[in-house]
Amino acid sequence: MTTATVVHAFAAHVATRPDQPLITFYDDATGERAELSRATLANWVAKTANLLIDGVGVTPGQVAAVRLPPHWQTAAVLLGCWAAGLSVDRDGAGSAAVGFVAEGASAPTADEVYALALAPFGMPFRDGPPRATSDFIVEVRPYGDRLPALATEPGQRAFVDGPTHTDLIARAVRVPARVLIDVDEHPDPAVWLVAPLLAGASTVLCRHLDAGRLAQRLAIERAAPLGQES
């Protein structure tokens, strides 16, 4: 498997077993459950990367400000940014070529800002996006679902003022083959996204996890909790 960068590793996994489940997402506050195969997430990643390259006109080495909580759509945004050769600023404190923001969060300073409703089934904003932003779901849909040539280099910083892709790969923690992660306890993408992806694991991501459902969910999803190796 090619592991030059995180997104190269993702593309290699997609090429080998595209139909394998990759992310099962739960939000116990809304009742949402979404399941994405490697191929399905790859389509979202490709559309995001193509939006950035062909729509926004980004170039490798620029910065994307990403103010999004752990979510399957956030996974698509992060991987799409890396596929386009961008470094990600999670705090969004500085200026950036492009920004991504969840409803209710303050928008970063960027040339173009996309808002995500993070609604079930990947639905757009019902009443339109927040002022001075574009609806990510509406804007990304027309773009191609094939990954462009991957522009990120191993020594490039995955996160601004943070680890490079080489560092992320070297530091990735071991995870079970199917792992359940409480993303409110582990909001770092290096944990909930990168480590399982590099391991070729499938992930059950739980947001607003109801602790009373944990044992049943582990059994139903045939998953092990983070920290328990398979």
Image: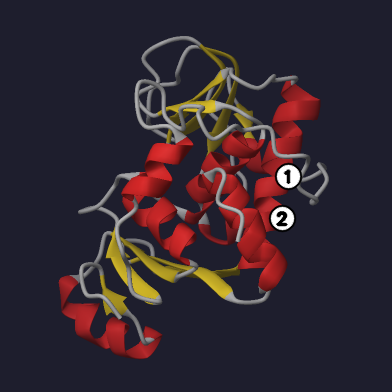
**Under tag 1, what secondary structure?**
helix
Label 2 neighbourhood size at 10 Å, few (<14), some (14-19), many (20+)?
some
Q: Amino acid at mark 1?
A: Lys
Q: For residue 215, what is the image quadrant?
A: bottom left
Left or right: 57 as drawn, with respect to 6:
right
Question: Residue 15: where, in percent of width, then height?
Answer: 71, 65
Q: Quadrant of the N terminus?
A: bottom right
Q: Which residue is mark 2?
A: 43
Mark 2 → mark 1, Cα distance in angstroms: 6 Å
Which mark is on residue 78? Answer: none
Q: Which residue is mark 1?
A: 47
**Residue sitting nearer the eye, 210 or 143:** 143
Left or right: 150 as drawn, with respect to 205:
right
**Residue sitting nearer the eye, 45 or 207:** 45
**Mark 2 vs 1: CB contact within 8 A:** yes
Question: Residue 53: where, in percent of width, then height?
Answer: 75, 28
